[in-house]
Amino acid sequence: MNEDPAEEPLASETEAMLLAHVSSILAGAAVTAAALDDLAEELHGHLVERLRSHLSQGMSEADAASRAIADFGPADRLAREFGRTYHSRLWASTIGVLLPAVVTSGERPRVVAWLRFTVGVAAVLLFGGLILNASPATPLRALGWTAVDLVGLGALVLAYRALGAGQRWALWYAIAVAVVLLAIGIGEVVWPSRPATLTISLGAVLAGGVLLGVRSAWGRLQAYVSGSRPIGRGLVIALAGSLLLPVFAGPVLAVLPDPTQASVADLTLRVSMTCDGGNPASGGPSASGVQRITLVSEATWQRADFLPLGVAGLVPSSSPQGDGAGFQVINNQPAGAIVPTWLLANNGPQVVDVQTGEAAGWFGASAQSEALLPPTVGSFTIGIEPAAIQAGHTIRASWLLAPLSPAGAAWPRIEAAYVHLDRFMLVGSVGCGETVLGHGAPLPQPVTQAQALSFP
Amino acid sequence: MVTPRLDRGDKSLLLLGLLGEREMYGYELVAELRARTDALIDLPEGTVYPALRRLERDGLLAGRWVEVDGAPRRRYYALTAAGEHALAEGREAWHRFAGAAEGLLGR
């Protein structure tokens, strides 16, 4: 046996103390994997040498270990200095502060694991929300969603790690996440997104249970994070923003103008109506001929959207999406009448690209915007291929109408409308022999399938 | 190239100064700093390592591991050519600063 205590092997508890200090420093420093082992060996070697020098002066091993660790310096300070060595100043002043090393003094309460699980669930929900929200969004809005949700995800990952290291900010952040999940769940019950439905959010149930657990273990939680240092006000505000932004991003991004998309100013709608076979001058039918109305709507685009349906629009879809156009014959169905006065006189309207002569749409299609043409739903609407909408091209739709009654009918006025996706609408009202330019009109509430199929 | 400035509170120049004499490892540098300054410069010992790694990252030092009988390996550091140049510049800056301070306060 070696008689010099400074030469004897160290007790496993002593080694564990030294290694814990080294781990604490390097965990907070977040150094690269390549540098980690190298640094750990160097720092551990220093601690062992200092400890042995204290041992040679007659200290007990436990005291010598504590003294060596104290001589070496506080883990959080060293972690910050290593952080500045291996990372940028921005990193050191943000993440380097949020993830410092803390040797937790108190035992980790079980509810900490549940809080971390809740944070993990929130991260999964946020990631799912990112896919659902960003993929069908226009480019600028998709970027907005991605930025907001990535910041939120980053904060959640940081909070997950920092809570494991006994950080007080992470405890409050996790509690706030649980409160937000609970509030969203309550909101779904009180203001359901689909009327007359009851949605119980599993996330809200989890959050409610965890919050009760936090309440009962509050004293132990306080002890668990007691070694943590406060973070600056700026970081507190940034963390609060990262938590609330994903919740409120939807309404903000929805009204955010996206310059990659065409506006109502980029579309010209020309509507014309020709009356044949009757007596347009007298405004009534004539027994001398069969009445016919030719209604033509020409939509000319000065500029087209870039990825109007987001990256999701690049994936072939079984349900056609695009623009819609249609018309209503004003007073076509007088009160008490069972059927309309004017109907299509042939198989359906023609939709062509004037420049190429190719078909550019279809009759009666279920285009995304069709539901926004309320008076014409289910009758004379057309769908327009998204690919046909190109800058400098004109899409012409023409309808041929005839009166239902062989006795003829009074010449009507007709209002034609063109809706671009669910974004804007142009309308124009014409009578016999007239040509008008459409003007912007407010979008009505979308019509449900049930409403569309119900006839008065 | 980064030149450590002692007059601006950068302790790296002291490390370069010591390593300009001979190759040393971290523990040895801390002990030398303490002994040579009569413990006037007595930093938390661990702070020497981020400084050494920073100097190594900047190309002023080169580190190498050395096996030691019955003890953990030691990582020795030596000045590179850039380190010698930085040390010379740092010394010159320090002498100018110290001379100016002496002229002002030394009476």
Image: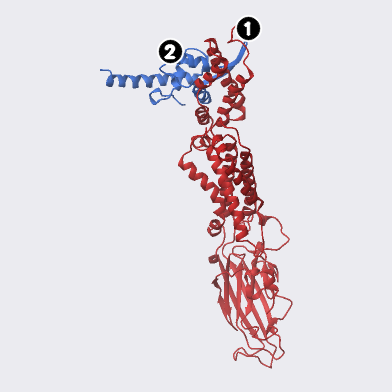
Chain colours: A red, B blue
At a point 53% along the width and 10% down the height, the residue shown is A58
Specify the quadrant that holds the N terminus of chain A. Answer: top right
Q: Can residue A354 be seen?
A: no
Provide residue A312's location: percent of width, then percent of height: 66, 55
Q: Which residue is mark 1?
A: A2
Eye-nearest disc, 2 or 1: 1
Provide residue A300's location: percent of width, then percent of height: 59, 68
Residue that protrudes farthest toward the left in the picture: B107
- Seen in the picture, residue A89 relative to B28 is either above or below; the reply is below
Provide residue B47's location: percent of width, then percent of height: 49, 23
Q: Can residue A314 be seen?
A: yes
Q: Which residue is mark 2?
A: B36
Left or right: A375, with B107 as reference point:
right
Task: Give the camera-side residue of B17 and A103.
Answer: A103
Q: CA distance from mark 2 to mark 1?
A: 33 Å
At a point 43% along the width and 13% down the height, the residue shown is B36
To which quarter of the image does residue A25 belong? Answer: top right
Residue that protrudes farthest toward the bottom in the picture: A287
Provide residue B46's location: percent of width, then percent of height: 51, 22
Task: Give the camera-side residue of A28 and A215.
Answer: A215
Q: Looking at the rendered structure, which numbered label has been put on residue B52? A: none
